Amino acid sequence: MKNKYKRILLKLSGESLAGVNKTGLDVNVVNRFAKQVAEITNIGVQVGIVIGGGNIFRGLSEKASSMDRVAADHMGMLATVINAVAFQDALEAQGLETRVMTAISMPQIAEPYIRRKAIRHLDKGRVVLFAGGTGNPYFTTDTAAALRAVEISADVLLKGTRVDGIYSADPEKDANATKIDYLKYSDVISENLRVMDHTAITLCKENKLPIFVFNIENEGNLLRAVNGESIGTIVGE
C-alpha cells in the first residue's frame, strides 16, 4: 500500500512514555513506540517528533501552582529535552539515524533548532526530535508541535493518544460516548474539545494542516495512520 503521507509530525505526550507509572519513563513503552516509528521510517516516511514533558514536570500542574509561571514553563521545556534524548536512544537502537534539535541552546546535548537544517535532516531520512517547546514560556508542546509541523511543511500532524480518536465525551468516564470520525477546526474550538489547545488548533487551521488523532498504544497503528486507514479522528477543513 502506498503511504498517504510522506512527511509527518508525530506528537506524543510525556505521560504516554511513563506507561502505567504515570511519571518517569517506562523503557518498554519507549521501545515499543520507537519500533512503530522505525516501521514507517523504513518505508520512506520522513518523521519529525515532538514529545511533551508532563511525565517529569508540567508548568501548569498543581505542583507548579506556587511557582512563577516563566520558571515553571522553563522547567517543563527542559523535561521535553530529557524525553527527546531518551526517545533518541530508543530510535537508534532500532537502527535509525536521528537528531535532537532544541529551541533552547544546549550544544553539548543537541543541535539548535534551525528550520532549514531540520528539513535537510528529514530529506536525508533522519528522524528529527524537536525539543524545548517553542523556546518561550506560556506556550504548550501542542503549539510547539503545530508550529514545527507547519515550519517543516508536514503533510499531517499525528497525535498519538491512548484512545482511538475523539469522542463526544471522555470514553474512560462515559460508557455512552461515541467516536467522531471527522471534525472541523471550528468545531473543536467552539465545542471546547480537549484535542489540542486553541493556539495549536488555530495555527493548524490557518495553515490548512490536518490533525489525525489515533491510539498509538495499539501495535502497528502508526503505520496504519500513515497509510490513511480510518483508525482515528481527522480534524480539518
Image: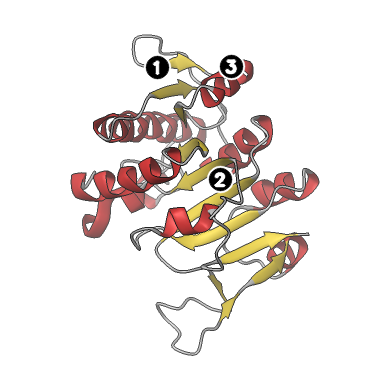
The CA distance from mark 1 to mark 2 is 21 Å
Q: Please state the horizontal and vertical placement of residue 137, each as a whole percent of the image.
A: 55, 32
Q: Residues within 10 Å of mark 2 (few under 14, many from 20)?
A: many
The residue depicted at 25 percent of the width and 44 percent of the height is 31
Most extreme residue toward the top is: 107
Rendering quarter of residue 235: bottom right
Q: Residues within 10 Å of mark 3 (few under 14, many from 20)?
A: few
- Identify the secondary structure beneath mark 2: helix
Q: Please state the horizontal and vertical placement of residue 15, each as a whole percent of the image.
A: 34, 51
Q: Is residue 159 above or below residue 215?
A: above
In the picture of the structure, the residue carrying the numbered disc 2 is: 142
Q: Please state the horizontal and vertical placement of residue 199, each as a whole percent of the image.
A: 68, 47
The circle drawn on residue 8 is none
Q: Earlier in the sequence, mark 2 or mark 3?
A: 3
Q: Earlier in the sequence, mark 1 or mark 2?
A: 1
In the picture of the structure, the residue carrying the numbered disc 1 is: 110
